[in-house]
Image: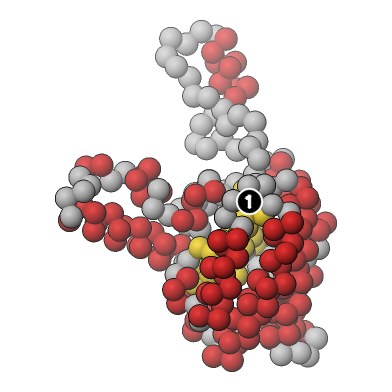
Amino acid sequence: MDGNGRWAQQLGHPRTYGHRVGSDAVRRIVRASRRLGLSALTLYAFSEQNWARPPSEVEALMDLLREFLLSERDDLLANDIRLRGVGRIERLPSRVRDVLERITDETKNNRTMTLSLALSYGGREEIADAARRLAERAVAGALSPARIDEAALEAELPSMSVGAVDLLVRTGGEQRISNFMLWGAAYAELYFSPALWPDWVEADLYEAITAYQQRDRRFGKVRSDVASAADARGPTQATTAGAGPAPAIPVALGAR
Ligand code: IPE
Ligand code: MG
């Protein structure tokens, strides 16, 4: 969700005003995602690197986050949305953490959509934290290093519990990933929107998803029609299957 600061500055306002208007865009897009039937939406709300912003901006973002959580609580419950934070949540000030933990607990049995807020989040940090936990288990004798593979590491990544990223959207015109869901985005379709985040409306989300639906996802394999044509010619060896039908898509919006 990039571009809040620039949006405000273009209008001669302080950056924090952009964050406030950006939080209205969050509400819009969460509602639209739920209506579309997305199973998972992960929003990059605050990166581990964002702590290095001016303290007043960090404070304003934390206040907004608390306000957002309090104001969304009833809607999350009413719409069967499970909320959770991913990232180094322990770094958040207690006034935010307390509300986040309470609503996470209150919504934990909701199933229709999982809304993950990436907070104090970094993709490298998440992988490093997972590696450390595996190492601790290995040292304790509970895990053989030989059993550390992609699946074992993936099981330690909180962002991956909703599945890998199908569509990764970045707003605000930049074309980079900025440490967002590095593991889960391995085969994500990337979509870059020039619109600044506060300007994002439902139609922008629909456009991103329409673009996604037109992509040909092969995951390193060959297209299924190509594979079955090869089959028809009668290879003796198993051919590579295609990607199959598009799944209900977890979407990740974000990155600065
Ligand atoms: C992203 O907008 C929002 C957060 C960090 C929460 P920015 O603050 O990065 O906006 P720009 O990129 O400076 O315009
Ligand atoms: Mg930015």
Depth check, front residue: 237 or 39: 39
Looking at the rendering, which quadrant does residue 118 occupy?
A: bottom right
On screen, residue 21 above or below 151: below
Residue at x-position 23% and y-position 58%:
136
Estimate how packed mark 1 is, as few (under 14), some (14 to 19) or many (20 or more) residues with alpha carbons within 10 Å: some
Residue at x-position 72% and y-position 40%:
214
Q: Position of residue 23 (x, y in %)?
A: 72, 73
Locate residue 135 relative to residue 59 in the image: left or right. left
Depth check, front residue: 88 or 95: 95
* Quadrant in the picture for the N terminus: bottom right
Q: Is residue 251 visible?
A: no
* Quadrant in the picture for the C terminus: bottom right
Depth check, front residue: 84 or 184: 84
Looking at the rendering, which quadrant does residue 200 occupy?
A: bottom right
The kind of residue tagged 1 is Asn
Locate residue 203 relative to residue 63 in the image: left or right. right
Residue at x-position 63% and y-position 37%:
247
Q: Position of residue 152 (x, y in %)?
A: 34, 45
Depth check, front residue: 228 or 84: 84
Check disc 1 and report its element: helix, strand or loop: loop
Which residue position holds label 1?
Answer: 110
On screen, residue 99 above or below 39: below
Q: Position of residue 216 (x, y in %)?
A: 64, 37
Locate residue 48 relative to residue 63 in the image: left or right. left
